Image (tube, rainbow, N blue to C red):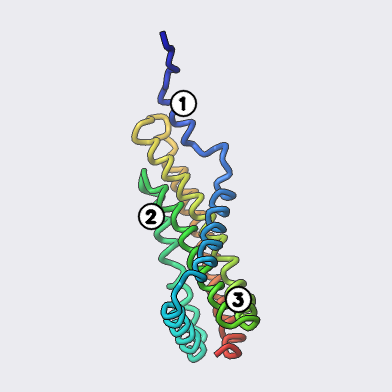
Amino acid sequence: MLNFPILRTRNIFSLTSFKKVNLFKILFIIFTFGFIFGAILIAFNKQEALNQLGFVMQNYITTRVKQSFFAVFFSSIFKFFPLVLLILLAGFIPVGQPISFFVPIFHGLGLGICTSFLYYSRGFNGFLFCILLIAPCEIIFSFIIILASKCSIQLSNKMFKNIFYRRFRQKNNLCLKEYFSLFLVLLILLIVAALVDTLTTLIFARFFV
């Protein structure tokens, strides 16, 4: 007669607690995979699609060069903020973990396509563009995305536990306070990233028009 192991609620939730998993490293790997895949994807695009992408990017650069400091600054904030807001809201959904896993790979994919296309179309000038205009801001913003996703996944997991596991309900207020405190810090970092993006744009963008 076969003896099956007894599955208890406590054991099931311990498997989904992520306590023994370094989520930051996993999300960083996911982001890196998205970046590499996006970079490779350029090689399989048709010339017509590449021409359209080049036109959009050139128009974007030209427009930003003509903008004032505050116009570039606020456009940078509004460019970054929706992803962070999406991650924050996903944390309140008991099954919102897939969203928080998807955002880093989505951002990495876009970044990989952008940088790979610049190098493909402009050569060394494209490399300089990435180093001077993209990298300073994206290092900060990618860190924000990965850290925010980590915290969102952890809160989602706790929300899921709250539905079935009564013991976790007493910790809700503390978890939410820590969650909002962290996202407040990330919001400050987001402003810093937008400021860096603005300064690098105003200083270097005119050399690539």
**Amino acid identity at mark 1:** Asn
User: Could you say where residue 121 lies in the image, as x and y percent from the top left?
Assistant: 55, 81
Q: Residues within 10 Å of mark 2 (few under 14, many from 20)?
A: some
- Which residue in the structure is indicated by mark 1? 11
Secondary structure of the residue carrying numbered label 1: helix
Query: Which of labels 1 and 2 is toward the front?
Result: 1
- Which residue in the structure is indicated by mark 3? 130
**Amino acid identity at mark 2:** Leu
At 57% from the left and 77% from the top, the residue drawn is 120
Secondary structure of the residue carrying numbered label 3: helix
Cα distance in 3D space between marks 1 and 3: 47 Å
Question: Which mark, residue 151?
Answer: none
Question: 84 and 131: which one is in front?
Answer: 131
Secondary structure of the residue carrying numbered label 2: helix
At 46% from the left and 36% from the top, the residue drawn is 16
Question: 200 and 99: which one is in front?
Answer: 99
At 43% from the left and 63% from the top, the residue drawn is 83
Cα distance in 3D space between marks 1 and 2: 28 Å
User: Could you say where residue 186 lies in the image, as x and y percent from the top left?
Assistant: 52, 60
- Against 65, residue 34 (above or below) is above
Q: Residues within 10 Å of mark 3 (few under 14, many from 20)?
A: some
At 57% from the left and 54% from the top, the residue drawn is 28
Question: Which mark, residue 89?
Answer: 2
Contact (Cβ within 8 Å) of mark 1 with mark 2: no
Q: Residues within 10 Å of mark 1 (few under 14, many from 20)?
A: few
- Labels 1 and 3: the sequence-earlier one: 1
